[in-house]
Image (tube, rainbow, N blue to C red):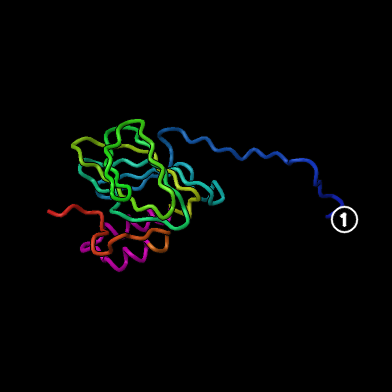
Amino acid sequence: MDDIAKTDYFNDVLEDRATVILPEKGEQLLLNDIEFTFKVTSEMSNDQLGVYKITLNPMAIGAKLHYHRFMDETFIVDKGELTIQVGEEEYKAGVGTIVYVPRFTPHGFQNDTEEKVELTLLFNPSQKREGFFRGLQETLMEEPIDPKKYLKLYNKYDSFPVDTSNMIPKREP
């Protein structure tokens, strides 16, 4: 009964839980021709938001056509020209372009240029997306890539390829 008596139901309890992430800070993962930097993680945001900086080297594929069931994804192009497919449409997204992709919307993205593309990627909620990126690093570094392992990783982290026969983010020679 004492705990109930001490609880203040009428006033907010303010907390200082902000995080400031400087441009050069954040955990980095390198994956063949893509670099990921974790800015706002699932742990920081109580799994509500994930913010990641992505650098795609020339001709790099970020992801083939897929969708999410439980999270929305937002792309903000910071440098270069990102090719993004949303549904049946393909767009050339230049600097400053924002592409909001709600759940159940098929999408994929890649760099079709000879210049680096940099973007900010947001997931809401984040669904522990850092585990997905770490798993991608492990899975895509293997030769040959195991499609079953790749699909298992995808599905665990709320990603569903539209075509499982064309889901590995590699360009065909």
- Count the marks: how many? 1
The residue nearer to you, when weighing 18 against 91, is: 91
Most distant residue in the bottom direction: 148
Toward which corner of the image does residue 165 lie, by quadrant? bottom left
Return the x and y of residue 151 as percentages of the image width and height: 33, 64
Return the x and y of residue 68 as percentages of the image width and height: 41, 56
Identified at 31% across, 60% down, the residue is 162
The residue nearer to you, when weighing 40 against 172, is: 172
User: Is residue 133 shown in magenta?
Assistant: yes
Toward which corner of the image does residue 159 lie, by quadrant? bottom left
Return the x and y of residue 35 as percentages of the image width and height: 32, 44
Which amino acid type is shown beneath numbered disc 1? Asp
Residue bearing mark 1: 2
Horizontal side of 82 relative to 20 (left or right) equals: left
Most distant residue in the left direction: 173
Q: What is the secondary structure assignment of the residue under circle 1?
A: helix
The residue nearer to you, when weighing 113 against 91, is: 91
Q: Is residue 147 above or below residue 123?
A: below
Identified at 26% across, 41% down, the residue is 83
Q: Is residue 76 above or below residue 50?
A: above
Mark 1 surroundings within 10 Å by alpha-carbon count, few (fewer than 14), some (14 through 19), many (20 or more): few
Most distant residue in the front direction: 88
Return the x and y of residue 38 as percentages of the image width and height: 43, 44
Identified at 18% across, 37% down, the residue is 114
Quarter holding the N terminus? bottom right
User: Is residue 141 shown in magenta?
Assistant: yes
Q: Is residue 57 above or below residue 150?
A: above
Horizontal side of 132 relative to 171 (left or right) equals: right
Q: Which residues are magenta?
A: 130-154
Q: Main secondary structure of the magenta part?
A: helix
